[in-house]
Amino acid sequence: MPEQSGARPTIAIIGGTGDLGTGLAGRWAAAGYRIVLGSRTREKAVAAAQDMGAASVTGDDNLGAAQAGDIVVIAVPYSNHDAILAEIRPAVAGKIVVDAVVPLVPPKVSTVQLPAEGSAAAIAQRILAGTARVVSAFHNVGAAKLRGEGPVDCDVLVCGDDKEARDAVIALADAAGTRGVDAGVLANSVAAEALTSILIGINRRYKVNGAGIRITGLPGRDMKHDG
């Protein structure tokens, strides 16, 4: 479904029935975006969309959701990451694909364990090479924070090799009540993905829920940034 000129893009969330997926969906729906939740089965996605009680949120299977979205967000467990990307590859040609997946390896999820490729985003770029514009984001914001009301006290590091795509995802981060920060090229996603394990450990040791990050010294949400 192509984006209409001047209209907000339709956002497909693959893994949209999970905690992060529903948290982002609720925020974006409240901001006026049309959302399509994707799941392995259409029935599960439709039920999750109905539970959200917003007319702008619908559900479909992963491939159907990817076909419907102008921007496709990947919010699935790392164990399913590669297979799902391969499944939706034909449906994301020319689109922005936002990879929010962190390479967590149970049981030691508070220990950084990056893949041989360096990051989940690098794997996504390899699988979708020549098809989609891959951007990584939303690794370090807890789902519990997204379910709350008002601004989220958390920055979102946005990495990608295409500046226009990065800017589009920064706008989505801002619409979700977080602050999107341009973190440069996709290779830099390794830092954001590794931070998630560190934040999980901080949550456990300090007995808090949803430790996040803030980049200090920035002038605010409307900051200027270079390519």
Image (spheres, rainbow, N blue to C red):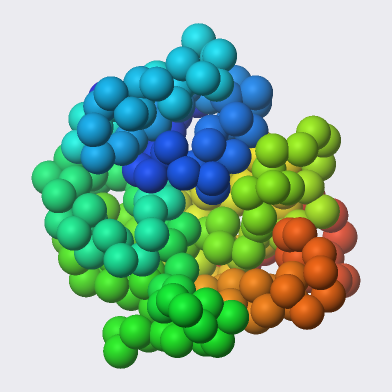
Residue found at x 12% / y 45%: 90
Relative to the observer, which residue lies in front, 187 or 54? 54
For residue 212, side relative to residue 161 (left or right): right
Q: Quadrant of the N terminus?
A: top left
**Where's residue 27, x and y in %?**
64, 33
Relative to the observer, which residue lies in front, 19 or 178? 19
Query: Total number of numbered labels?
Result: 0
**Quadrant of the rendered structure where residue 93 is?**
top left
Residue found at x 78% / y 47%: 152
**Where's residue 21, x and y in %?**
49, 42
Residue found at x 51% / y 19%: 51
Res 131 visible: no
Relative to the observer, which residue lies in front, 159 or 227? 159
Res 75 visible: yes
- Up the image or down, 169 lies above or below 38; here it is below
**Where's residue 222, x and y in %?**
77, 49
Name the residue furthest front: 107
Residue found at x 38% / y 59%: 77
Q: Quadrant of the C terminus?
A: bottom right
**Where's residue 85, x and y in %?**
23, 56
- Up the image or down, 116 lies above or below 189; here it is below
For residue 218, side relative to residue 141 (left or right): right
